[in-house]
Image (tube, grey):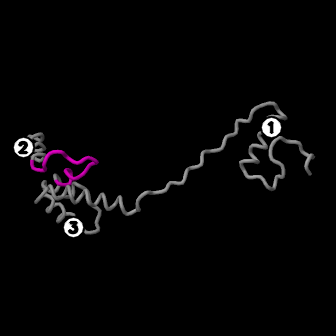
Amino acid sequence: MPGEFETDYWTPIEDRTAYQKKHNITGVWVKTTGKKSTYTDAPIGKRKVRTEGSFVTPAFVIGVIKKRLAKTGKAGVSLVEEIDSFGDQPMDIRDLRTTEAKDALIYISGGKEKLMSFSKWRLQRLYRRGW
């Protein structure tokens, strides 16, 4: 067997990995045709190791929502009551009956926390609406 097929690469085909086989084939291709192969491996995704449990993110979001709801006061309470009244039915912001509840939902929504208090934010919102 050794010497039957001359190559500068690895020898017994059975003992080769996929990486070795690919490079052996490309090497033979270059030697016989004189052209370089354009074949490339698709990138293989790296395994990600989490540094925290899968429950941490939902717990963090729940904490942020509770903190923001606490800032809204009575409007937050009315928002929670209205959401509870819907039960398992799907709902939209237009389904909320009171403006307080809508304002509280808008205040607690978003990626960033509002810098001003809920009452000042609501006054500014009412002023911009022209009320």
Q: What amino acid does circle 1 point to?
A: Trp
Q: Is residue 108 magenta?
A: yes
Q: Please tell me whether mark 1 or mark 2 is closer to you in this view.
A: 1
The alpha-carbon separation of the residues under discs 3 and 2 comes to: 29 Å
The alpha-carbon separation of the residues under discs 1 and 3 comes to: 69 Å
Q: Which residues are magenta?
A: 104-119
73 over 115 or under it: above or below: below
Point out residue 70 in the picture as x, y percentages from the top left corner.
16, 59
Lateral position of residue 36 relative to residue 6, left or right: left
Q: Residue at 36% x, 61% y: name it.
A: 56
Q: What amino acid does circle 2 point to?
A: Trp
**Mark nearer the N terminus (1 vs 2):** 1
Lateral position of residue 61 relative to residue 17, left or right: left
Q: Please tell me whether mark 1 or mark 3 is closer to you in this view.
A: 1
Q: How many marks?
A: 3
Give the SS element for disc 3.
Answer: helix
Dividing the picture into quarters, in which one does residue 30 lie?
top right
**Residue 29 - label:** 1
Give the SS element for disc 2.
Answer: loop
Identify residue for label 2: 131
Q: Residue at 17% x, 54% y: name it.
A: 104
**Mark nearer the N terminus (3 vs 2):** 3
User: Which sits in the foreground, 48 or 98?
Assistant: 48
The alpha-carbon separation of the residues under discs 1 and 2 comes to: 78 Å
User: Which sits in the foreground, 53 or 117?
Assistant: 53
**Residue 84 - label:** 3
User: Which sits in the foreground, 128 or 107?
Assistant: 107
Q: What amino acid does circle 3 point to?
A: Asp
